[in-house]
């Protein structure tokens, strides 16, 4: 079994920054791609970013490109999401997820394990 635990969420003013962390246990973390998703109230969960198992490749949703950075530390079994220039529309619960099969995936169904989520609220 895999456990993913997110942390780092909170309340921040527009234009501010937050760094989310996701600690993994239970599998060879360094072998799998990791993704971040988010779900705003009343909306479907949406893809935010993905990072390959080695960290050499990343991909972002257009809505966060240039503002968010995904990274990982395989020695610490942790993936990060650095969020800069935050906007009120970034308010959501943020989830990390592990993808066991394949190199890439931007759909919820591409991922096998999910964290419990961490709330990010951006005030205007």
Image (cartoon, helix red, strand yellow):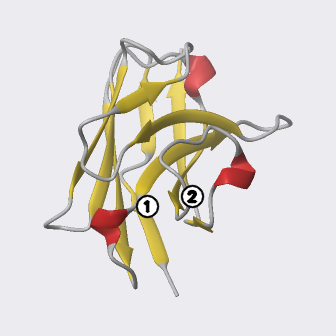
Q: Is residue 1 left or right of residue 78?
A: right
* Residue shown at the point (44%, 15%) measured from the top left: 65
Query: Quadrant of the image for the C terminus?
Result: top right
100 w.r.t. 96: above or below: below
Tag 1 secondary structure: strand
Q: Residue 67 appears in which quarter of the rendering?
A: top left
**Identity of the residue furthest to the right in this view:** 42
Please rate how many residues cluster around mark 1, counting C-alpha atoms within 10 Å: few if below 14, some from 14 to 19, many from 20.
Answer: many
Mark drawn on residue 117? 2
Q: Residue 89 appears in which quarter of the rendering?
A: top right
62 vs 17, nearest the viewer: 62
Marker count (numbered): 2
51 vs 96, nearest the viewer: 51
Residue 11: image location, x then y, percent: 45, 38
Residue 117: image location, x then y, percent: 57, 58
Please rate how many residues cluster around mark 2, counting C-alpha atoms within 10 Å: few if below 14, some from 14 to 19, many from 20.
Answer: many
Residue identifier under label 1: 6
Residue 30: image location, x then y, percent: 28, 64
* Residue shown at the point (48%, 78%) measured from the top left: 3
* Residue shown at the point (24%, 50%) measured from the top left: 54
78 w.r.t. 1: above or below: above
Q: Is residue 92 left or right of residue 108?
A: left
33 w.r.t. 123: above or below: below
Q: CA distance from mark 1 to mark 2?
A: 6 Å
**Identity of the residue furthest to the left in this view:** 75
């Amino acid at each position: 079994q895999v456990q993913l635990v997110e942390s780092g969420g909170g309340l921040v003013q527009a234009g501010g920054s937050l760094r989310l962390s996701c600690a993994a246990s239970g599998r060879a973390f360094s072998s799998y791609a990791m993704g971040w998703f988010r779900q705003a109230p009343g909306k479907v969960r949406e893809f935010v970013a993905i990072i390959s198992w080695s960290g050499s490749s990343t991909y972002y949703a257009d809505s966060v490109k240039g503002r968010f950075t995904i990274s990982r530390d395989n020695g610490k079994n942790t993936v990060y999401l650095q969020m800069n220039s935050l906007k009120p529309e970034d308010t959501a619960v943020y989830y990390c997820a592990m993808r066991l099969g394949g190199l890439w995936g931007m759909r919820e169904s591409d991922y096998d394990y999910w964290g419990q989520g961490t709330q990010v609220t951006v005030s205007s």
